[in-house]
Structures are given as structure tokens and as C-alpha cells.
Amino acid sequence: MNVNALIALLRAHDLGVDARTPLVPAQIAAITRWRERQEQMELAIAREEAVRLARRALEVTTLLGANQKRMTELIQQSPPPRCWRWWALAPFQSLPS
């Protein structure tokens, strides 16, 4: 969601990023390193918000990766449910007519 808001902001204000196509992670990382400039108030506020949104997008991406890694570990450690039957694991076979 933060990336969509960031793209909308970049499309609405000329901050030097071509946002006609989806942003790549390198572009988002570059936006997080933007510094304050002497510019019109509207652009300064838009730039500040773009930095905030980009930082949050990177943070959420990192958290999502850690969550996915943890979920994979938990799934690999858990035993299969007891309700599985032999037919649930066997390949599908057609019934005799």
C-alpha cells in the first residue's frame, strides 16, 4: 500500500523520478536517501512524504521477508495433521465404472 501511495505522490509532483512504470527496489532505496532541499513548500512537503513512504515500504518488505522465513520454518517443523488418510496422499485414480 505504501508503494502505491508513493507512486501516486511521485506522479502528482515532479520530484525527479519517472513513476510511469512500477518502482524497482533500487529506486525506492534511493528515495529513502533524499535530503531536504531549498524548494517550493509544496515540493518540500511532497519530498518529505515520499521519503517517509519509501522508508516504510522498505521496512514492510523486510518484515514480510522475515515473516515468510519464520512461517516456512514452522511449517517444516510441524507434523502433518492426523486426519490425513492414505487416499489423501495417493495420486488421483478414477473409480471403476
Image (cartoon, rainbow, N blue to C red):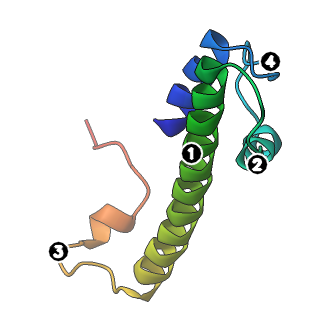
Mark 2, mark 3: which one is toward the viewer? 2
Residue pointed to by mark 3 = 83
Q: Amino acid at mark 3?
A: Cys
Please name whichever residue, 90 or 32, is drawn nearer the observer in this view of the structure: 32
First reached walking from the N terminus: tag 2 or tag 3: 2
Q: Residues within 10 Å of mark 1 (few under 14, many from 20)?
A: some
Mark 4, mark 3: which one is toward the viewer? 4
| Above or below: residue 15 compared with residue 54 | above
Mark 1, mark 2: which one is toward the viewer? 1
Q: Residues within 10 Å of mark 4 (few under 14, many from 20)?
A: few
Q: Secondary structure at mark 1?
A: helix
Residue at the location (77% across, 45% down)? 35
Mark 1, mark 4: which one is toward the viewer? 1
First reached walking from the N terminus: tag 1 or tag 4: 4
Labelled disc at residue 29: 2
Q: Amino acid at mark 1?
A: Arg
Residue at the location (24% across, 72% down)? 84
| Above or below: residue 21 compared with residue 87 | above
First reached walking from the N terminus: tag 2 or tag 4: 4
Labelled disc at residue 18: 4
Residue pointed to by mark 1 = 52
Residue 44, quarter of picture: top right
Q: Position of residue 80 (x, y in %)?
A: 32, 80
Residue at the location (28% across, 42% down)? 96
